[in-house]
Image (cartoon, coloured by chain):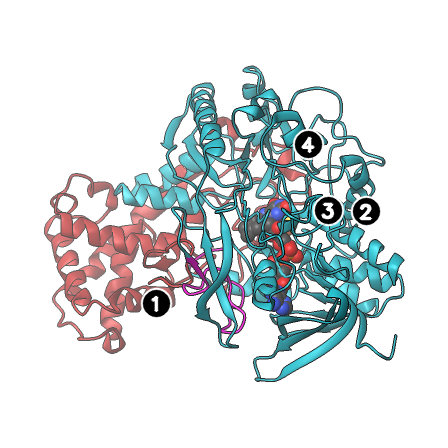
Amino acid sequence: MHVPPAPSPADAPSSPSRRRLIVSASLVAAGAALLPWSRMAYAQSPAQASPAELAGFLALSCLLTSRPHLDAALSQRVFVALADGDRNFGFKVRSLADALGRAGITDMKAFKDSAVDKDPDSKALVVLIVSAWYHGYTGTPKSLTSVDDTRFITYTEALMFAPTRDVTVIPTYARAGTDYWAHPPASIATD
Amino acid sequence: MNPQYDADVIVIGSGALGSNAAYELAKLGRSVIMLEAGSRIPRWKIVENFRTSSRKSNFNDPYPNEPWAHTSYDPDYIENTGSFNFKPGMLKLVGGTTWHWAAACWRYLPNDMKLKTLYGVGRDWPIEYSELEPYYQRAEEALGVSGNGDEDQSGQAGKPWPPRSRPYPLPPEATTYMNQRLNERLAKEGYHYIHEPNGRVTRPYDGRPACCGNNNCMPVCPIGAMYSGDMHATHAEKAGVKLLTESTAYKLEKGAGGRIVAVHYKKPTGEDIRITARYFVVAAHGLETPKLLLISGVANSSDQVGRNLMDHTGIGLTMIADEPLWPGRGAVQQGGIFNWRDGDFRKQHSAVKHSMANAVPNLAVTNRLLHKGVVGPELDERIRHDAARWVDVGTVFEMLPEAGNRVTPSDKKDALGIPMLRVNYDVGDYTKAGKVIAKQDYAKFAKILNAEVIEDETGWQNRDHIMGSVIMGSDAKDSVVNSECRTFDHDNLFLATTGVIPASGVINPTLTGVALSIRIADTIHREL
Ligand SMILES: Cc1cc2nc3c(=O)[nH]c(=O)nc-3n(C[C@H](O)[C@H](O)[C@H](O)COP(=O)(O)OP(=O)(O)OC[C@H]3O[C@@H](n4cnc5c(N)ncnc54)[C@H](O)[C@@H]3O)c2cc1C
Ligand code: SF4
């Protein structure tokens, strides 16, 4: 289990703009890491994925999610979950990395309306990978049944919580004491 | 204990209703055995199961789903034959389904209990509100209800209503910033926002810590601030009740003079056991209770067992408002709009309740954005923007009892060889007429909040409130139990379930069920 980061004391306002600057700078490095991997031979099954392939997937994930760092163990879980049941997954991932390289995309700011964005298969794969990281699971949950194709990746590290981390909670964790909710968050004026 | 019997009273089911009945009887010195189909699981394990679940919106998922004690979402457990997929959340473990309820603890209004007399539709309760009032108070004290006794909960902006003999045991929690804003804007247009009395304690109470807004009431409160039935299962045991887990009752045995003499139960190990008592209380949930009666061939001279099944079948509205409101701070729900709770309109259409959800909306928000293909830096910006403005309205409707809406044993059997459930359920015209009114409100809400409507045609939705299935009435010919929750056919068989409720209103039924269960305990104690 991941121990969740301690909540910020009293709704400290975030500074998204500064955070994003740091992200962009480090992504240049992440993008560079894609290149050797995109020329690599690809494993037949997720269980056989080589360390280099997994490193490549991690770098690709960093690029697609605009994150300077992602957890390598989680990245492997995402890779294995998505590759399970799709023998071509590794190949598709490599093609996507190639396409991003050809389009010169080293930062997701350059993704919108790019050739990769406009190619439906590539776009679908981008959304699939980003979804796993943001949701913290793969597959599609079905309501009112105990059976579906979802696979758990992570809870507290699911990226969907990051943008609201300073205001709400990751459910089951607390942020402040009873009745803190009577007051608007500190960021309200700029939200 | 009388040596002729295994216990004075056998209670079947350790949910909130069974456990409260058992506890009251034990406190009065009675010997009680409580049978529970499921296992006992500590809270921390359920919390960890939730955190590692890939189905966070599936509230049954963190709980055990055993071949001999299914949750209601097991694909084989409920077979539907009607137009609606009736699948209420339901759990089988010590404490029952209130492990993942939202702890809304409303009382019915006096008028809710006279639906037929006042509005000419449905059925009346065979008792008046005033008879139930002292038991409501005891139930609120048992569950630790936080509430605002100064509001007109009938939604008409009148005097405090319904009447109460004593204040709520605990003061209400602070109104969330979101609800303060919604109140302000909706009130101008005549909508009455009412605080929801709830079983989340606002200060330490009965060994429970105060709610601190972990926002996970459904499917499990990590700190036990919210009431759940396991609390009284434990109280009952401490008071001397013998709780037998993994023990599924499958037969109530009839004896001389129409009395029930024994209950037969099975264990996953294959053991098959018969135990006896002077009184029997079936508290096995609103679907399992009628099933047990039907497979036992008891209590059904009226042919009403399993019929008149009602949920507060509902619809929903999701919007993005024009200002940051920040749902997700505090508990998962806190109140709603009650303009259509009571009035002469009930002659024409069902009552309507709208509640504003306060769950952290990130999953729904993110899912929608990804479906739209939003990726890149825009994704984080939009998550924050939309999550701040997400307004999720859950609407419920009053239902009328209809004989064709029905639960029966299915042909499919569980691992113990006991039949599972078949449900036939259609939504009636009275409720459909209420939906027209609700949709008019939806349009107004969207206008007032200057909102982008994300979804306002959800189709009918389950609301997990089981009523009518062992209906209460004054006539043995058309009802299963009398006003005491005693079966007409068997003097010593009582049903502690929300399934006895004959007129659904629009409020969550469990507090009423607990009040009736405490009353059952008093009645049995007097007779023993
Ligand atoms: C998501 C959700 C939210 C809800 N929110 C609210 C709310 O806010 N307010 C409200 O009032 N209500 C709410 N409800 C409804 C509430 O959960 C039920 O009304 C309540 O649990 C009923 O209690 P019970 O004791 O009758 O049944 P249960 O809690 O279901 O307990 C029945 C017990 O009996 C056991 N059992 C069943 N059959 C047998 C057998 N044959 N032998 C032995 N044991 C058996 C079961 O294993 C179970 O433990 C909600 C429900 C859901 C699913
Ligand atoms: S908001 Fe959190 S602490 Fe409060 S009752 Fe719900 S889950 Fe428990």
In depth, the one of B206 and B209 nearer the eye is B206
**Element type at mark 4:** loop
A97 versus B414 height, above or below = above
Residue A98, quarter of picture: bottom left
Residue type highlighted by circle 1: Arg
Q: Residues within 10 Å of mark 3 (few under 14, many from 20)?
A: many
Residue that label 2 marks? B138
Left or right placement of residue B85 versus residue B25 in this view: left
* Tint of chain B: cyan
Counting residues from the start of the chain, the first of labels 4 and 2 encountered is 4
Q: CA distance from mark 3 to mark 4?
A: 32 Å
Is the same chain shared between marks 3 and 4?
yes
Counting residues from the start of the chain, the first of labels 3 and 4 encountered is 4
Residue type highlighted by circle 3: Val
- Residue A153, given in percent of the width and then of the height, sits at 39, 63
Q: In this picture, which residue range is highlighted in magenta?
A: B55-79
Q: Are marks 3 and 4 in contact (CB under 8 Å)?
A: no
Q: Is residue B213 visible?
A: no
Q: Residue at x 29, y 69 (%)?
A: A80
Residue that label 4 marks? B114
**Element type at mark 1:** helix
- Which chain letter goes with mark 3? B
Residue that label 3 marks? B201
Residue B125, quarter of picture: top right
B62 versus B470 height, above or below = below
Left or right placement of residue B3 versus residue B258 in this view: right
Counting residues from the start of the chain, the first of labels 2 and 3 encountered is 2
Residue type highlighted by circle 4: Lys
Residue that label 1 marks? A77
- Residue A126, given in percent of the width and then of the height, sits at 23, 52
